[in-house]
Image: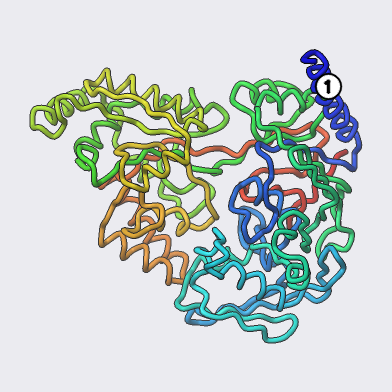
Amino acid sequence: MKRTLFILILTSILTISLLGSVQAQDKETFVMGIEDEVSNLDPGFTTISVNERVASLIFDGLVEYGEKNKIVPGIAKEWTISEDGTEYTFTISKGVKFHDGSELTADDVKFTYERILDPEAGSGLRAKIESIESIEVLNDYKIKFKLKKPYSPFILAMTFGIVPEDYVKENGEDVLSRNPIGAGPFKLENWEVGNEIELSAFEDHWNKVPKLKTVIIRPIAESSTQAMELRSGGIDFAVNLDVGQLQSFADNENFKVKSAPGAGINFMGFNFDIAPYNNLEFRKAVIQAVPFKEMVPQIFGMLGQNAYSMLPPTLWPDDREYLKENTVKFNPAAARKKFAELKENGVIPKDFTAEIYVSNSRPSQVKTAEAMVTALNQAGLTAEVNAMEFGTMWDMLGRGEIGMFFLRFVSDPDPDYWLYRFFKSDGSLNRAFYEDEEVDQWLEEARVVSDQEKRAELYVNVLRKVLTKDIVFYPFAHSNQIYVMKDNVMELEPGNSLLIPLVTPTANVYKK
């Protein structure tokens, strides 16, 4: 019986692999491996990255990301912003079709945003548009958003995928999540849960007809399995390969390895409510003790680069040179001396052990934490790594139970999303429990100022204060976004971790 079951399982695996290989040989079919199973394709609730990236192929927004993530027209061909920054009026292109053939109008746009705004719906996107006071349909192709007060990053929320009001009302939101209908370049053909999602080109797309006629999306969690499928021809594209696997493809002329900086920031944080982590000299000594700049290239390899700012290299303002020059430098002798003084003065208890909390799902961070423990012990501070499931760790951080921690963060291309929630006194991600009136003032002012140069000045003030003076966080590595693909895949470029750029303002991916 066991032998029969084993043969059946092995046969199924071989069948799936062979089928994928046949699909990948078709020049009009693109087979991609992603790191996890898709669970929901409702664009109002796709806050998990794999869901969001797949949904981006099915739905389009009023605006979209263009070259270097600049906002460009999408379904809306133009828009105006009132002088006081509280009214955004969008003009929608006529003739935009949903996949069921119905026309997209301003009513669908209003419905899309009102369902996200509904607090009972529980959308994770609500925080990005809660500044909306009212939404007014002016005619079938014109809509106005009235804000409670100016909010500079508001335009980024206009990238949300528009859903068809009639379809959702007739079928329900559960149907939308499993059988989505949008106005994007691809439409859903079939979804075999746990196996694959099949999309087909939407021939009536308002902007570009995709050159790829079929897209197959396969969840493959293991890096080694993705690599095997790529080599055997089972997939054309992979996004979840580890350092060792990446190098083997980089040296192979049959494949392309493309990298873009700024997919995320890896950083260490301190709790300002827990001693001795709330002591500035202690925080400085911790950083002095650890050779982060030497460790990052060794541990992250192609997956990362040294960081000095909380903002990725692709995002303004660029103040990395100042931050690099003024960050605490590696100086183990000074760290050892400082730890001894802090112990003598009672700041560090005699039996104290510094626990470094890290998610066990981030192997590069775990390795960094382990190397950090070795360095701290050599500098005279007893330390240990506490690697755990991220959800458990996040709950503990929220309760203020962790003194020193590693996190990774990815967000939209506006400084507000990267700084406000972490450093504002009542910020939703303020797990350092950091409070500073001056920083609060700068962050609030930056939200209502429309001039980008002025906003940049304010964010520079924030970064210099929290990273070089108060040392709330210590950013050590930017995560690179890396695509690995067959050499016949054309126009597929990394650069935005929120989407899969198969059809964009600057590209229309195909296989030659």
Q: Residue at x 43, y 71 (%)?
A: 449
**Furthest residue in direction front, as rendered:** 1
Image x and y of residue 430, in percent: 36, 52
Which quadrant of the structure image shows residue 349? Answer: top left
Q: Position of residue 150 (x, y in %)?
A: 46, 75
Identity of the residue drawn at 20% across and 23% down:
336
Q: Residues within 10 Å of mark 1 (few under 14, many from 20)?
A: few
Say which element carries label 1: helix
Q: Nearer the viewer, residue 146 or 19?
A: 19
- Residue 326 in view (yes/no): no
382 left or right of 390? left
Q: Measuring 53% from the left and 51% from the top, which residue is drawn there?
A: 411
489 up-or-down from 502: above or below:
above
Q: Outermost residue, left direction?
A: 345
Vertically, is 462 above or below 265? below
Task: In this rendered view, identify the residue nearer to me: 281 or 272.
Answer: 272
Can you identify the residue that label 1 sits on? 8
Colour treatment of the image: rainbow
Q: Is residue 148 left or right of residue 117?
A: left
Q: Amino acid at mark 1?
A: Leu
**Residue under the point 84% across and 29% down:** 16
The image quadrant where one finds the C terminus is top right
Q: Is residue 247 left or right of residue 422?
A: right
Compared with 245, 177 (above or below) is below
The residue positioned farthest toward the top in the image shown = 3
Q: Quadrant of residue 156?
A: bottom right
From this viewpoint, is residue 3 visible? yes
**Camera-side residue of 211 and 202:** 202
In the displayed structure, 326 sits above or below 99; it is above
Quarter occupied by the N terminus: top right
The total number of labels drawn is 1
What x and y, as percent, mark residue 224?
A: 67, 23
